[in-house]
Amino acid sequence: MPQDFVVTHGTAFHEFRVQISASTGPWKWLILFMVGLILANQHSSWKWWLALSFLMILFLSQASGRSESIIVFPGHGIQLETRNGFEKMSATTRRFIPLTVIRDVIINEGLYGWNVRYYLAVMTEDPLGHQEIHVAFANVLPRFPVLLEVYNGIHDILEESKINM
Amino acid sequence: MLAANLIQRGHKVIVITHSHPPDRVGIRWLLPSLKVYYLPFVPIASSATLPDFLSFLPYFRTIVLRERVRLVHSHASLSALGHEGLLHAHLLGVRTVFTDHSLFGFADAASILTNKLMAGTMRNVDAVICVSHTGRENTVLRGELFDESEDGRTMVPGRQSRRISPTHCMDTVTIVVISRLAYRKGIDLLVATAPLICDAFPNVRFVVGGDGPKLIDLLQMREKHRLQDRIELLGPVRHADVRSVLMRGHIFMNTSLTESFGIAILEAACAGLYVVSTRVGGVPEILPTDMINFAEPDTDGVSYLDRSGGTHDPLRAHERVKALYDWAEVAERTEVVSSWGAHAPDDGARAVFWPIYTIILVVDCVFFLFLEWWLPRENIDFVERHWDADKFREIVQDDDDSSGINGNDNMARD
C-alpha cells in the first residue's frame, strides 16, 4: 500500500507524518458483503453470518488508513502518535517524551525478522538513570529516505530551539 | 587488523557472525568504519553454532543485497556460517574467497566429516588464501583441490607490525604464555614442564594469560608445587592489554600441539621477546632461526631454555620482525587474491559429487525463490550511508576550528 509523507509546520509544533491511505481495493469486500447479505437472508444459517462478519472486519481493517507521526514541540518535547481507522473515526495512541529526558534522536539499523530495517529512535534517560529507546514509526516502518528527512528536520528544529532559548 | 587495513585502502568491509551471549545481537559498529552484524543464532559450545544449511540464507540474502556486497570472504572451516555463506553467495552472483587458520588431521571422525564438508564447499569457492605453506598443503589435501586448472591458486600472506618499545633487563627472567587454555594449545605440556623449569632455574617467573578449559589444570599444578609466587595467572586478557603483558616478559613460550601460523608467536617476537616453541605445523615458517628455538612436542623437549642470557637483543628483534611482516602488505595481497576471485570466469557447471549435496543445493535454490517472493528486492532498505573517512576528517577539523558550540550536533549529522 502506498505511503505518504507529510510535513506540517505550525507556530509551536512541527509534525512529520507517514500515512498509509485507504485504498479502493477493499471496497470489493463491501460489495461481496452486500451480495452475501442478500444470500444470507435467503438461507439464514449461522455460517453465512459468520462469513459475513468476517468479511466486514476484513473490509474495515483494509479500507481504513493508518498513520504515524512524530510531532516536535520546540522547548517541550517530542510526541509519537499512532492513528488507526478512518479520518473522522480513529483510535489514536499518543506518547509524549519531555525534552528533559531526551538524550538523542538517532537512525539505527535493526534485525526485523529475516529482514534488516532502518528505524528512527528517540533515546531517553530519566533522572534515575533508566535508559530507554522509543522507536518512531514502529508500525508503518518507512524506508530510509523518509527517515533521513525526518531526522534532519528534527535536528534542525532542536538546534534552532537551543539557540533561541 | 586485516579489515582495518582493507578499509584504509578504500574498501567497505562488513562482518557477519553469530550472536554472543548474553545479549550481543543486532548491528554494531566496531572501531570506526567496521560494521558487524550479530545474527541470532544460538551458539551451543564455545561459540560454535550448529551447521544448518538453510537457516542463514534469508539473513545472508538481505544483508548482501542491502549492502551491495560483491565479495564474500569466509574464515575457518568449522564455521557453519562461513560454509553457508560460500554456498549461498553463488545464488546472488557474489564472488567468494576462503581462508583457513587451523590445521586439521585426517584420521578422526570429526575430521573426516568436516573435510568432506570442506571439499564440497571448495568446489564453489573462487579463491583460497592460506596462512602458511604447511597450511596450504593441509587445505589442498583436505579440500581435494587436485585439479590444477581449477581456481585453486593460493597465496601466503605475511603479517603484522606493531609499535613496541623494548623491555629493560632484569635479574629475573620472565616467561610469558598467552593463549587459549585448551588442549590443542598444549597446555598439558606447560603444566608438566613449568615445575621442572622453576626447579632448574630459580630466577625464572611465569606469567600466563588467557582462559579456557585447562585453567583448572594450571591452578592445580600451581597448588601442588606451591609456585604461587612464581607463576602468575592473569585470566582472560583483552586484546588491547596483550601488549602490556608481553612487555613484562623476556621469553615467550608456545606449546601448541598444532599451529597453522601462530600470530601470538609473531606478536611476541615483535615485542622483542625471545620465542621458544614446539616445532609443529607452520611455526617454522614464521621467524628466522636465530629468533626462535624449537623443541619436540613432548615433555622433555620443552624443558630446555634460558638461551637468551644476554645474546638476544629485543630492539633488534623488533626491527627485524617489523621489516618482515606488515598488515598493510597483507591487505594488499588479499586484495590481489580477491581480484583473482572477482575475475574468475563464471563457471556455471560447478562439479558436485554427492547426491546429498545436490539435494541441499536444490532446496537452497527453492528457498531462495521463495524469499524472492516473500521479501522482494525492491522493498529492502538499501544501505545508502556508510562510514565516510573523509567526512569524519572534515568534521573533526571543523570541530577543532570552531569554538565547540553545537559540536555534538555536527557529529550526529551524516
Image: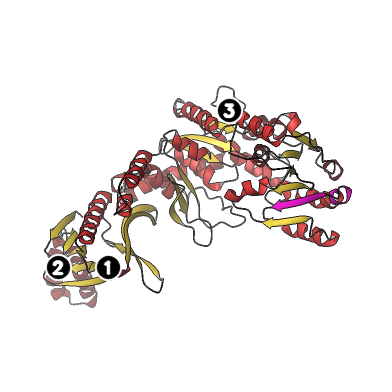
Q: Is residue B99 left or right of residue B375?
A: right
Q: Amino acid at mark 2?
A: Phe
Whether the magenta-drawn stretch holds residue B212 is answered as yes
- Within 10 Å of the Cα at label 1, are there few (<14), some (14-19), or many (20+) other Cα atoms? some
Determine which residue is flagged by label 1.
Answer: A99
Determine which residue is flagged by label 3.
Answer: B155
Mark 2 or mark 1: name the one nearer the start of the chain. Answer: 2
Q: Is residue A114 left or right of residue A143?
A: right
Nearest to the observer: residue B143 or residue B26: B26
- Within 10 Å of the Cα at label 2, are there few (<14), some (14-19), or many (20+) other Cα atoms? some
Provide residue B284's location: percent of width, then percent of height. Answer: 72, 32
Determine which residue is flagged by label 2.
Answer: A86
- Where on the picture, by quarter, is residue B67? top left
Is residue B196 visible in the rendered image? The answer is: yes
Residue A70 to residue B412: above or below: below
Whether the magenta-drawn stretch holds residue B117 is answered as no
Q: Amino acid at mark 1?
A: Leu
